[in-house]
Amino acid sequence: MIVTAASGDGGIDVRGTLVVGDVIRTRMAVQVKRWKRNVQAPIIQQVRGSLGAHEQGLIITTSDFSNGARNEAARPDATPVALMHGEQLVTLLIEHDIGVRRASYDLIELAEEEE
């Protein structure tokens, strides 16, 4: 995995290889957006334009994606770009215990009075 420079990288934050089951290896270029507003289609186009040969794109945001961005990412005549929105990111972090702390609580109920 390589964290790219702050500028001149076409917006790509990380380049690496995704390994699945020690069999499938996919070169990935990832852009992360810590935004409150939805990611729009031009960002998808920018990432797609920054992809190297045989590289897949992934955009992760703390917010969500506009319908236009979703349509652009899935455009059939272009290299697909995977999208991960904020809820998916949080679910993944919880699932793998990354950056979360689990706490348990006792639930106490009062017994009803018997007559």
Image (cartoon, grey):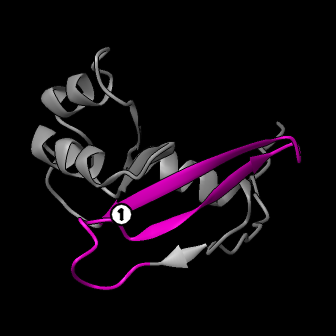
Eyeballing the image, is 44 above or below 97? Answer: above
Give the mark count. 1
The residue nearer to you, when weighing 39 against 80, is 80
Q: Position of residue 11 (x, y in %)?
A: 25, 66
Whether residue 92 sits left or right of residue 41 in the image: it is right
Q: Is residue 19 magenta?
A: yes
Q: Residue at x 74, y 59 (%)?
A: 96
Whether residue 50 sits left or right of residue 27 in the image: it is left
The residue nearer to you, when weighing 92 against 75, is 75
Mark 1 residue element? strand
Q: Residue at x 28, y 44 (%)?
A: 48
Q: Position of residue 90 (x, y in %)?
A: 52, 55
Q: Is residue 3 magenta?
A: no
Q: Residue at x 74, y 53 (%)?
A: 110
Q: Position of residue 84 (x, y in %)?
A: 43, 44
The residue nearer to you, when weighing 10 against 104, is 10
Q: Residue flagged by tag 1: what amino acid is it?
A: Val
Whether residue 63 sits left or right of residue 109 in the image: it is left
Whether residue 95 sits left or right of residue 114 in the image: it is left
Q: Residue at x 68, y 75 (%)?
A: 101
Q: Which residue in the structure is indicated by mark 1?
A: 32
- Which quarter of the rendering shows the C terminus? top right
Q: Quadrant of residue 1?
A: bottom right
Q: Position of residue 4 (x, y in %)?
A: 40, 79
The residue nearer to you, when weighing 59 against 18, is 18
Q: Crowding at label 1, few (<14), some or many (≥20) Cα neighbours within 10 Å? A: some
Taking the view exactly as shown, the residue that stands out farthest to the right is 22
Taking the view exactly as shown, the residue that stands out farthest to the front is 53
Q: Which residues are magenta?
A: 4-33
Eyeballing the image, is 68 above or below 25? Answer: above
